[in-house]
Each structure stands twice: as structure tokens, then as C-alpha cells.
Amino acid sequence: MSKQRIAVYPGSFDPVTNGHLDVIRRAAGIFDKVIVGVGRNVGKAPLFTTEERVSLIQVAVSELQNVEVQSFDGMLVAFAKQHGASVLVKGLRAISDFEYEFQMALANRHLDPSVETMFLMTSAEYQFLSSSIVKEMVRVGGDCSPLVPSVVMDALRRRFDGSACQL
Ligand code: PNS
């Protein structure tokens, strides 16, 4: 039997958006197994706890048989190796993402050259979309329901019900 091709799709997913789901679906069509790795970005204070972010993604990807969701702490490449993955999948929006993602890909290669980073270009309709933009839209009372799965929309509504300006 040939070796399973396993990829990790890492991010903070605070919260997961339809742009993330687009990348997850496409990666799931390329790899035998995709592990969505919910990590901590030291530069960001998350709105949802790690457990909440994991469970929102689990609901959103429930129809994808070869996708798993796990949280991780510490080094991403170590998490990938622990799960038998030799590829990190990242979504890439316009030029603005490139410098940061290039730096992260090189840092991860420095830490473990056997783990390769592969980029999937974000679909055109999601080029502007990010978790931060979604939170900002909710904060100012905009409708972001076409941009996130319904389970995330419900969670955002519950979180900000009557206290939108505290976002
Ligand atoms: O969605 P984000 O916020 O861009 O995700 C960033 C994340 C969590 C993938 C990144 O911060 C990460 O990989 N953190 C784990 C620590 C690590 O291994 N850093 C990379 C090399 S320094």
C-alpha cells in the first residue's frame, strides 16, 4: 500500500471563514488526509477560545470525510511531523499576504527542511476576506452571513448580541 499523503492546514481561524473552507475543500481533493491545525498567533488576541475555534471548524467541515481538526501549541513543523504530514498548505490572497507567508515558509523550512510549504491561491471571490474583516463587519453591524458558515454566524451573533462595540 502506498504511503498516505497527509497535509496540515494551519491557522488561527478566529473564526473560520468561507475563504478558509474553500482552501480546506480544495486541499482535501489533493491530499489523502488534511489536518486543520488550530494554533496560536502570538501577534493576535483571539475572540474565540481554541476549543471554540476547533468546534466551529469541526461543524463546518463535517461533510468532508478526509479532514480532521486539531489544536496545537508550540512548533508547527513538530505538530505536522507528529501527525505524519510532510506538507503545510497555506492559502495566499493578493500580494499583501506574500511577504509574511514567504517569511513563515522559510522559517518553517529552517526548522525542518523535510516539511514543505505549498500555497493555494485564494479563489477570486474571497480575495478580500479575512477573519479580521468578518469581525470588523459584525462590529459595525454589517451582514457577513454570506462570508462565513452559518454555525460561525450564530456564534458571532451570540458573542456580540447587544455588545457589538466591545468587539
Ligand atoms: O492564521 P494565522 O494567524 O496566520 O496563523 C498563524 C499560525 C498559527 C499558523 C502561526 O503563527 C504558527 O505557525 N504558529 C506556531 C509557531 C510556529 O511554529 N511558528 C512558525 C515558525 S517561527
Image (spheres, grey):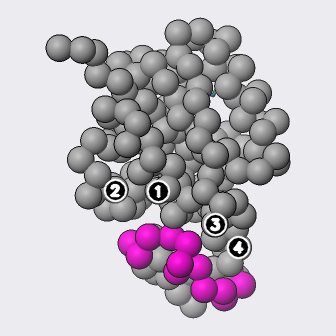
Q: Circle 3 — which element?
A: helix
Give the distance between the C-alpha atoms of the residues marked 1 and 4, in whole angstroms: 20 Å
Q: Nearer the viewer, residue 113 or 94?
A: 94
Residue type, numbered disc 1: Leu
Q: Is residue 87 visible?
A: yes
Q: Is the CB of the residue bearing disc 2 within 8 angstroms of ligand 1?
A: no
Mark 1 or mark 4, earlier in chain = 1
Q: Is residue 75 above or below residue 97?
A: above
Left or right, 49 with respect to 165, comes to left
Quarter of the image where the N terminus is located: top left
In whole angstroms, how far apart are the C-alphas of marks 2 and 3?
A: 20 Å
Circle 2: is it few (<14), some (14-19), or many (20+) Cα within 10 Å?
Answer: some
Residue in the image at 51% along x and 64% along y: 18
Tag 3 residue? 125
Sequence-first tag of 2 and 4: 2
Residue at image x 49%, y 38%?
A: 9
Q: Residues within 10 Å of mark 4 (few under 14, many from 20)?
A: some
Mark 3 residue crowding within 10 angstroms, few (<14) / some (14–19) / many (20+): few
Q: Magenta segment, which residues?
A: 140-151
Q: In this figure, which residue is indicated by the disc labeled 2?
A: 61
